[in-house]
Image (tube, rainbow, N blue to C red):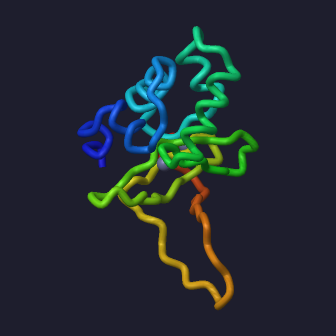
Amino acid sequence: MEQTKSNISEEQILRRAGIRITAVRLLILRTINREFSGTFNLADLEESLPTVDKSTLFRTLNLMTENHILDAIDDGSGSQKYCLAHFDDNQLKIKHVHFTCHICHQTFCLTDILLPEVTLPEGFQVEDAEYVAKGICPDCAKKHA
Ligand SMILES: [Zn+2]
Ligand SMILES: [Zn+2]
């Protein structure tokens, strides 16, 4: 899944999403794409980009989430997490499973595990879905073995 990230430039990602390209948006997306391998929150982004003010970071995260560049994940920690969305060859968003470790509190992107299809009763129209598995990550399992 790493190649979905690198074979398209940040400019292309913004253009494809119909977001006007500005220097600060490009900087933010570049940081997300290059510095975070899994999920991150606003505080992580602030730490990586101390020169950009917090409200700009917050607004840009919202904009990118609304335009499906980012996935927003509620892992139960109370702090909104984000990760870069992945797309298939037809530019359809591929939703992947996340895993939250209750020891190190990291939320991992399991980009190879796609969201299972769930058939709902008639009358229910799905607009969004997420799957967050919770437990102990491999590193913590090793340390606590
Ligand atoms: Zn862990
Ligand atoms: Zn993810």
* Number of numbered discs: 0
Is 86 located above or below residue 81 in the figure? Answer: below
| Residue pictured at 24% horizontal, 39% vertical | 7
Is 131 located above or below residue 62 in the figure? Answer: below
Q: Is residue 80 left or right of residue 82?
A: right
The one nearer the camera, 80 or 54, is: 54
Q: Is residue 56 left or right of residue 36?
A: right
Residue 107 in the image, given as x and y percentages of width and height: 56, 45
| Residue pictured at 75% horizontal, 43% vertical | 78
The one nearer the camera, 64 or 21, is: 21
Would you identify the image quadrant in which residue 128 lies?
bottom right
Q: Is residue 33 left or right of residue 77?
A: left
Would you identify the image quadrant in which residue 82 lies?
top right
| Residue pictured at 32% horizontal, 40% vertical | 5
Q: Is residue 145 visible?
A: no
Is 22 located above or below residue 117 in the figure? Answer: above
Residue 80 in the image, given as x and y percentages of width and height: 68, 41
| Residue pictured at 61% horizontal, 73% vertical | 126
Residue 66 in the image, given as x and y percentages of width and height: 59, 46
Would you identify the image quadrant in which residue 10 lies?
top left
* Quarter of the image where ligand 1 sits: top right
The one nearer the camera, 8 or 98, is: 8
The one nearer the camera, 76 or 82, is: 82
Which residue extends farthest bottom?
122
Residue 14 in the image, given as x and y percentages of width and height: 42, 36
Q: Is residue 52 visible?
A: yes
